[in-house]
Amino acid sequence: MGMGKAGFYYPGADRLLHPPPLLSLLVLITFSSRVQIGVCQVQTPQCRIQKCTTDFVSLTSHLNPSLDGFDTEFCKALRAYSACTQRTAKSCRGNLVFHSAVLGISDLMTQRNCSKDGPTSSTHPEATVEPCNYHSRHHGPHAAGGERARPAYLFCGLFGDPHLRTFKDHFQTCKVEGAWPLIDNNYLSVQVTNVPVVPGSSATATNKITIIFKPYQECTEQKVYQAVTDDLPAAFVDGTVSGGDSEARSLWVAEKAAGRHVEIHAGYIGVTVIVRQQGRYLTLAVRVPEELAAAYDETQDLQLCVNGCPTAERIDQDGLLLPPPPPVLGLQQQQQPGFQHQQHPGPAPATPRGPALEASRRRAPWPSARSSWR
């Protein structure tokens, strides 16, 4: 053995001189984070190097070095990372994290034989469409026209004796005794049953709510939820708590307070329904995308949430039913000889509501637009 320069050697030591690119990236990010924590003043509000690094991580975290095509995709991501640093170079002047990233990018491009010119990865990779998610289906990156705006929502509520808020933000107090449809469109039906609060009074309150989610593709079969006073189940009438694939969470029931507050989320149509019991009666709040609320035909026009209560069912501020509109007299009848216009007394006023009813009105102010969706 000849004499030579002393040194140490062990198998695998040569690999430390050229670490895998993802390992180098991890070291770079760790160093960058430590610098930011230790010297918080280095990162100025205008310097966006952290955003560049985050985008690079999202573009490369799923890559596998053992698979074909790794080098191509990794070089695309590196070029995108480099372009991002160039765009923020002016505002990052003197920033240690920025200069460390620039050096790290250069080293990685040399190790992987990446050219400086060539295609780059998109910082917004295409997301897959979830067929049973309304927002992904209609307002995701693959939506018609490329629109990604959030959908417009409409709100409807029924509570008290009973007070109604329509989709058009009209507020009414109605009698509507018996079973009445609040919503009846191609996707959803909501029906309430109202009973008199005081015998002989025009005021009623809700003691039963029936909600039907109609079948939709592979997302859910028909599901029915029904609540009555003192019985707010945390499941549909068939005993299940979800519809369709439970993992997709296209439709499910969530109990917020046992026997008092239940929410039903229909993710496949973007609908949320809230059912509560207040005292002896039920209240309802519904949030529906605007385009779905309009999905009905002429045979489904009787919807309190859409058109409000019929005039004959509305109650004025004094607790009296509004008088029906006067009959329209035909022109021929008015032109008959000897016809004389007579004053006809209006209909007799309805029975005023009792003190308990007025107290209920005072306790139930109109809700704000988002009070039920906190």
Image (spheres, rainbow, N blue to C red):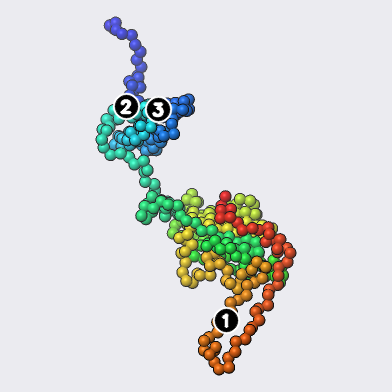
- Give the image location of residue 111, x and y in percent: 30, 27
Amino acid carrying label 2: it is Asp
Amino acid carrying label 1: it is Pro
Check disc 2 and report the residue beneath it. 107
- Give the image location of residue 280, x and y in percent: 69, 60
In the image shown, does 159 or 355 lie closer to the viewer? Answer: 355
The residue positioned 71% from the left and 61% from the top of the image is 359
The mark closer to the camera, 1 or 2, is 1
CA–CA distance in space, label 1 to label 2: 89 Å
- Is 85 left or right of 205, judged from the image as shown? left
Based on the displayed image, in which of its 4 quarters is residue 92 positioned? Answer: top left
Mark 2, Cα crowd under 10 Å, few <14 / some 14-19 / many 20+, is some
In the image shown, does 253 or 134 lie closer to the viewer? Answer: 134
Amino acid carrying label 3: it is Asn
Mark 1, Cα crowd under 10 Å, few <14 / some 14-19 / many 20+, is few
Which quadrant: the N terminus? top left
SS type, badge 1: loop
The residue positioned 67% from the left and 68% from the top of the image is 318
- Give the image location of residue 287, x and y in percent: 53, 57
- Is 19 left or right of 285, judged from the image as shown? left
The residue positioned 25% from the left and 35% from the top of the image is 117
Check disc 1 and report the residue beneath it. 327
In the image shown, does 274 or 14 lie closer to the viewer? Answer: 274
CA–CA distance in space, label 2 to label 3: 19 Å
- Give the image location of residue 355, x and y in percent: 74, 64
Q: Earlier in the sequence, mark 1 or mark 3?
A: 3
Q: Against 317, is 98 above or below?
A: above
Check disc 3 and report the residue beneath it. 95
SS type, badge 3: loop
Based on the displayed image, in which of its 4 quarters is residue 115 positioned? Answer: top left
